[in-house]
Image (tube, rainbow, N blue to C red):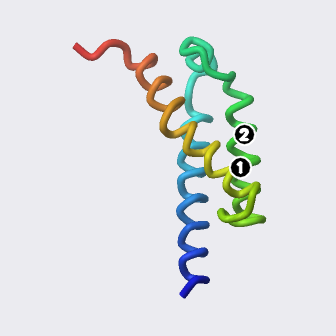
Amino acid sequence: MTTLIMIALRLLALGAGAFALFHAVRQRTDAFTAVDKLSKPIWVGILVVAMLVVFLFGVVSFFGLIAVVAICVYLVDVRPRVDEIQRGPRW
């Protein structure tokens, strides 16, 4: 049972990482700096490394937890701001 939970967590983290990486690659480069975030190449690199770490070590290792946090930071903080700056004001 524990093995199935670990596999599900790993797949969830890899799916979130793939979504975040796909999103980051498709965005304009200047959108990241316009919202005072790290540059696009840095975020793409962070997400690629995070996905590799999750794939190799899982999500409950020390490095796996750091990788999951990096993916979550992109999805919760960077992605909405980048989308907002490219969409413009909503009114």
Mark 1 = which residue?
Answer: 50
Height in image: 24 above or below 47?
above
Q: Determine the residue located farthest toward the left in the rendered image.
A: 91
Q: Position of residue 76 (x, y in %)?
A: 48, 37
Q: Amino acid at mark 1?
A: Ala
Quadrant (top left, top right, bottom left, bottom right) of the N terminus = bottom right
Name the residue located 57 percent from the left edge and 37 percent from the top edge: 74
Q: Amino acid at mark 2?
A: Ile
- Helix or strand or loop: what does disc 1 sit on? helix
Height in image: 57 above or below 2?
above
Q: Marks 1 and 2: CB-CB under 8 Å?
A: yes
Q: Position of residue 79 (x, y in %)?
A: 50, 32
Quadrant (top left, top right, bottom left, bottom right) of the C terminus = top left
Give residue 59's quadrant in the image. Answer: bottom right
Q: Determine the residue located farthest toward the front in the rendered image.
A: 62
Q: Position of residue 26 (x, y in %)?
A: 57, 33
* Left/right of residue 1 with respect to residue 51 in the rendered view: left
Few, some or many residues within 10 Å of mark 1 (<14, 14–19, 20+): many
